Image (tube, rainbow, N blue to C red):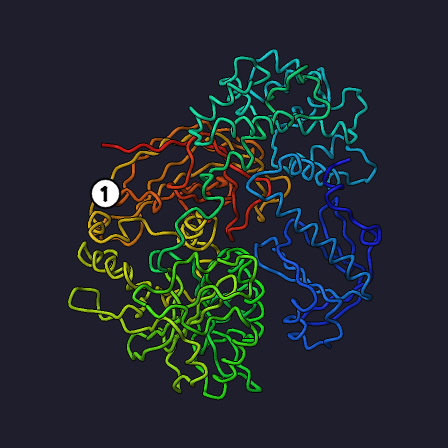
Amino acid sequence: MSRLMVDVHVPAQLKTGTLMLKVSAKKTIKTRVSLEYERGQIVWETKKGGSLNIESVREIRFGQDASYYRTQFKLSEDLETRWLTIIYLSKKSTYKMLHLIACDLDTFEIWKDTLLKILAFRRELLGGLNHMRKRQDYWLKQNWSQSDSTEDAKLDFQEIVNLCRKLNISVPQSDIQAHFDVRNLLLIISIYQTDSRDLFVLLSKQIADSQKRGYLDFPAFQHFVKLMKKRPDIISLFQQFSSQKKIMNVDEFTEFMINVQHSELTVSTIHAIYTKFVDDHDDDDKEKETGDQQMTIEGFASFLQSADNSALHEKHASVHQDMSLPLQDYFISTSHNTYLVGNQLKGESTVEGYIRALQHGCRSVELDCWDGDAGDPVIYHGRTLTRKLLLSEALKAISKHAFVASPYPLILSLEVHCQPSQQERLAELLKTCLGDALVDQLQRLDVSHLGQGISNASNVLGDRFKRIASAMSIQSPPPPLVPEKTLPPIKGDQSPTPSNGPSGSSSLISNPSHLPISTKKIPTSPLTNNLSNLIVYTIGVKARGFNKLTTYDPEHIVSLSERTVNKFLKGGTLRMLDLIGHNRSHLTRAYPAATRVFSSNFLPIDLAMELNSAFFDQNGRSGYILKPLPLRIKGKEKEAATKMHKYQLDITIISIQQLPKLVIEDDSAGIDPCVEVQVISPVPSSSCSSLPQSTKRRTKVVKGNGFNPVYHEEYKIEFEAPGEMLDLCFLRLLVLDAGCGGGNGGKEEEGLIGKVCVCLGALQPGYRHLPLHDDLGQQLLFASIFIKTAISKLP
C-alpha cells in the first residue's frame, strides 16, 4: 500500500459524501460534498458539477477564524461552529473560496481533521524538494486513479497514451507500446538515446506488460512509471563519480561532496547523509549488495533532489546573522496596502492579504483606517471603490498569524483618517485585539539607536504574550506635511502613504508578543491622547534632503516614493552616498508609485517582487536581513557606491522535471520548453537606468517534452557587483513554452510555465535542483530544474 494512504486516512463517509450547505454571495444551497482523495479532488453536486483539485488548496479556515466570511454573508453566529472555508487557486491562478456548513458537529470535525492532515501533508511534500519517496507515492497514486477512466483497476493501452499526454510526454505511440512489449525493447533504448547493454538488460527485466496481457495493473504501472522517469542525466553523473556502475561507496560520495559540491559540512555529517540515502531503493530492487549497503543510483537521485542538497547555503535554513544590532542595520520585509488582494481601485479588502503576507515572513503590514458605520473604523483604500474591511477583523487575523513564520518584531503601519471618536475606538481595538503583544511603552529611554537589538524581541520565543520589542513612529506626507506617528523601524516597499502620498501615520513594533503601529495620512483631526500614547519610538518627518547641512533627530523617519528612491539611485555617486549615510543611523521607508493602480507588482508577481522574495529567503526567512558592511560602517559606503567588482557565473542547464500544462493548452497539445537564464545585479550609481543589469542567455527548444527535457547547455556569464555585495545579485531562470509564444521575442509572461529566482550570495555551487514556481509565486509541486553552477571573481 502506498505510504500516502498511511499518512492521510480518509474516512468512508467523506468518500461517499456528506450533505452540507454551500454558501456563496448569490445563494445558499444544500449539496453532497465528497473527498475523492486518490483522484486528488473535492467534489460537490451541482447541475454543472463542481470540483477543485486538492493540490490547489492553500488555506483552511474554520470556526471563529472564518467568522469574517460568515458576517460578510450576514449569517447567524450559531453556524460558526460548523463553518469551513477552503481557500484555493483556480486554474487561472486566482484565489477562490469554497464556503461550507456541515449539518452536524461530528461531520464538521471529520472534515476539519481530514483537510488539515491533507494540507499538512502537502506542505511536507513541498519542503525543499525533500521527502522524495512520499512525493513519488503521492504522484503514482494520484495519476493511477485519474488515468483509470473505467475504474476497473487496470490501465489499457489507450489510457496509458492519455496519461502520457497529460504528463507532457509527447512520444509516438509506437514508443509507448515499446514499454508494453519486450519485442520492441530497442525503441525504449532509442528514447533514452543510449546503446548501453547494461541499460538494455535493466529495462528487459522491467518491461511493464511482461505477461503480454494488454493492460497494466498497479504493480505493472509502477514499473512503467519507473521506465518513464529514468534520469539519464543523473545516471551519467553517478557513473562519472563512482568506480562501479551500480553503486557509490562512502569515500566516493565524500569526495563528490567536498570537491564538486564544495560542501562545508564535516566528514561525519557527510557520512550521515550517505547512510540516510543508501536505503533509498525500490522494494523490488534485486541489486542490493550483501553485507554493507552502498548508495545506488536511486539513492543518489533522491539525495540530489532532497533538502540535504539544498540550492541555498545550509546556514540560511535558520537564523544565523547577528540579531543584536539596532533595527536600522537591517533590511526588513514589508508590505504596502496589505489588505488589498486585487487592484488599487476596485480590489477587495480582506483579512487574507494580512494572513498571506505574515505567512510569507513579512514584518511590516499596513492598515489604512477610515471612519466606519456604527462607530467602528474600517480599512480600505480611501476615495476608491475598494471594498471595506472592519479594523477589528484585520487585527484579529494579525494577532493570530503575527509570529507563525517569524518570531521577530512586527510593525503595523496605521494610516489614520478617522475623526476623534473613532480614533478612540481605534486605540481601544488595538489594545483589546492585540493584548499584551502590543508595545505601548518605551522599553529603553535611549533612542539614539532606534530600538533595541532584534534578538531582544525573541527572548521568550515560546510565549507570544511576553513583551519583547516595540517601536512607533510618526510619518509625514509629501507636499502638505504634518508630523505623524510610526512604529519601530521599517525598510523596503512598505510605506506610510497611499498611492497619492502619505498623510498622518503611526506604527508600532511587535514581536513574538509585540505588535507595532504606524500612521500615514494627515488626519482631519489631531491624534487623540489615547491613540497618541500608543506611538512610542519614532517620528515621521518630511524629507528635507540627505546632506551634511541637513540634520535629523535619531527618532526621525522619512518616507520616500518609489520614484524618489529611483532618482537617488541614478542621481550620481554623491546622492547615493548621502542616502547610504542617512540610513546608517535612521530608518527610511519607500512606498509604491501612484501608477501601480493595477497592483502590477504582484498580479502577477513581477521582477521586483521576485527579487524581494529571493532576498528574504535568507536568514531563516525571518524577515530581517543584516545589511552588508559597506552599508552599515562609516567610511565603507564609498566603496559600495562606486567600486564595482567583476565576477563570472559558470552555469549548466542540465534538465527539467515534470512541467505542468499551461491552462490554454488542450490535452493533446505538447510543450516545447526552453530556459531563459538571467543574471541580475545593481547598476553603477552613474547609470542613467533605474533597472538592474540583466545578462540573458537562452537554451535550445526541446520539442514535445515537458516531462523530462534534457539540455546540458553551458554558459559563462560575466557581471558586476558593488562592493563585493553578491547578496544584491540574483540568478533568475524562466521556463518558457516556445509553442505558446515563449522565447520568441514576445512579452516575458507569454508561454511562461515556471520560474525561480535565487540570491547569488546564498547559492551553493555544484549540482542543485531548484523548485519552479508559477506566476503568483506558488511552488509547483513536482516541477524542478537541474543545474550546475560556480562563481569566480575576475581580476
- The answer, for residue 596, to whether it is visible in the render is yes
The reply, left or right, for residue 29 in relation to residue 368 is: right
Q: Quadrant of residue 148?
A: top right
Give SS at disc 1: strand
Q: Is 763 above or below relative to 97?
A: above
Q: Give residue 502's position: percent from left, percent from top.
A: 36, 74
Residue nearer the viewer, 366 or 509: 509
Q: Give residue 755's position: percent from left, percent from top.
A: 48, 44
Q: Quadrant of residue 495?
A: bottom left
- Which quadrant does the N terminus fall into? top right
Amino acid residing under circle 1? Met
The reply, left or right, for residue 454 in relation to residue 299 is: left
Residue nearer the viewer, 497 or 312: 312
Q: Give residue 605's position: percent from left, percent from top.
A: 46, 54
Task: Identify the residue shown where x is 76% and y is 67%.
Answer: 82
Residue named by callout 1: 644
Residue found at the very far left of the displayed protein: 549
Q: Quadrant of residue 671?
A: top right
Q: How many marks?
A: 1
* Other-residue count near label 1 (Cα within 10 Å), few / some / many at <14 / 14–19 / ≥20: some
Residue nearer the viewer, 195 or 40: 40
- The answer, for residue 598, to whether it is visible in the render is no
Q: Is 603 above or below relative to 237?
A: below
Q: Is 734 above or below relative to 537?
A: above
